[in-house]
Image: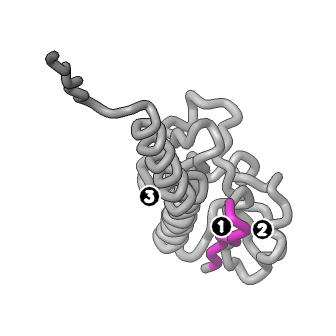
Amino acid sequence: MKTCQKNNKGFTLIELLVVIGILAILLSIVLIAINPGRQFAQANNTKRRSDVTAILNAISQYGADNHGTLPADIPTGLAADAELIGSVTLTEANICADVMPTYISALPADPLTNNGAAVIDCAAVAGYATGYSVVKDANNRVTVSAPSAQLEEVISVTR
């Protein structure tokens, strides 16, 4: 009598399920460690810091070329109010024609405003919005801030 030996090749269902389970646990640990939502928020805040500085530099260069005179349409208020009054934006300050294209090639926009697309033509865009606040105090110190900053950060620069 001959006995037939089975030649088992491959993995059993249990082995495959165990490997899939281990991979799922490792993937969830990696996703929690990376936290993509927080990474995107940090990237947006980095762009906001850069934009605020660029806008303030353009206003400062305008003032330097005009013997200390700032653009006339910047509203006067307290520097501390810049984060509180999100309604005071570059649209109301209307510095676009004063600083573009001589001092800045395009007015940057907040990443959550207009998909972050910069304002490149003041005449063609009626009612442009950048999402950044611009105010000056009684001593002509200009404060540019990003009221929509994420992760409870305060992004504001005064010069």
Answer left or right for 85 relative to 68. Answer: right
From this view, report whether residue 4 is shown above or below residue 38.
Answer: above
Residue type beneath disc 3: Tyr
Spatial CA span between label 3 and label 1: 16 Å
Q: Nearer the viewer, mark 3 or mark 2?
A: 2
Query: Quick check: 35 left or right of 80?
Result: left
Question: Can I make out residue 67 in this image?
Answer: yes
Q: Secondary structure at mark 3?
A: loop
The residue at 50%/45% (across/down) is 21
**Residue 157 included in the magenta stretch of the image:** yes
Residue at the spot x=78%, y=62% of the render? 75
Q: Quadrant of residue 119?
A: top right
Residue 144 shows which numbered tag? 1
| Tag 2–tag 1 contact (CB < 8 Å) | yes
Residue 44 visible, this orientation = no
The residues tagged by marks 2 and 1 sit, at their Cα atoms, a distance apart of 7 Å
116 and 157: which is toward the camera: 116
Reading the image, the residue beneath label 2 is 82
Q: Secondary structure at mark 1?
A: strand
Which class describes the residues within 10 Å of circle 3: few (<14), some (14-19), or many (20+)? Answer: some
Instruction: Classify 12 as above or below 147.
Output: above
| Residue numbers of the magenta segment | 150-158
What numbered label is drawn on residue 103?
Answer: 3
Residue visible at 56% across and 28% down in the picture:
124
For image coordinates 68% across by 70% down, the residue present is: 153
Residue type pointed to by label 2: Ala
Q: Earlier in the sequence, mark 3 or mark 2?
A: 2
Q: Along the polypeptide, which appears first: circle 2 or circle 1?
A: 2
Q: Residues within 10 Å of mark 2 (few under 14, many from 20)?
A: many
